[in-house]
Amino acid sequence: MAVHTVHFRRSGSAARKISLCGGAAVPGSGSSKFVGWFYEQDGQRTGPVTAGEIAARVQDGRLKPDDGVWRAYQDASGTYLYPARATDAMKP
């Protein structure tokens, strides 16, 4: 699995380094935990946000199918982002 370090900015805070994983596989049940969703729009990377925030952006058209969306998991070694579809956040 390819891993790249990228910078994401949370509203009102400094950019943080997070690892972007190229594979679609997500971590097992081990020590990693789900920490939220990230998205990229117009070159601006934002997160973590809730599934509800992603769903609201999809529903009102602010988030398009080709905008980047990732699920974020964290363990002792860092935060890792796994590719997803924006509509995945709308599933129960």
Image (cartoon, rainbow, N blue to C red):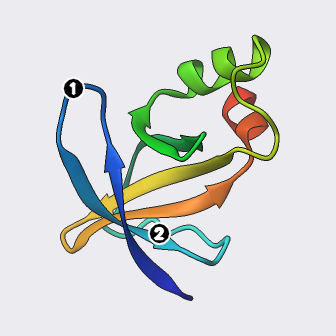
Residue depicted at 47% across the width and 27% down the height: 50
The residue beneath circle 2 is 20
Task: Residue 43 in the image: state x and y as whole percent.
Answer: 54, 47
Task: Residue 54 in the image: state x and y as whole percent.
Answer: 61, 27
Q: Is residue 92 at least partly visible in the picture?
A: no
Residue 32 shown left or right of residue 63 in the figure: left
Task: Residue 2 in the image: state x and y as whole percent.
Answer: 54, 87
91 is higher (above) or lower (below) than 72: above
| Badge 2 amino acid | Leu
Q: Quadrant of the N terminus?
A: bottom right
Q: Nearer the viewer, residue 10 or 87?
A: 10
Q: Dot 2: few (<14), some (14–19), or many (≥20) neighbours within 10 Å?
A: some
| Badge 1 amino acid | Gly
Residue depicted at 56% across the width and 63% down the height: 82
The residue furthest front is: 42
The residue furthest top is: 60
The residue furthest right is: 65
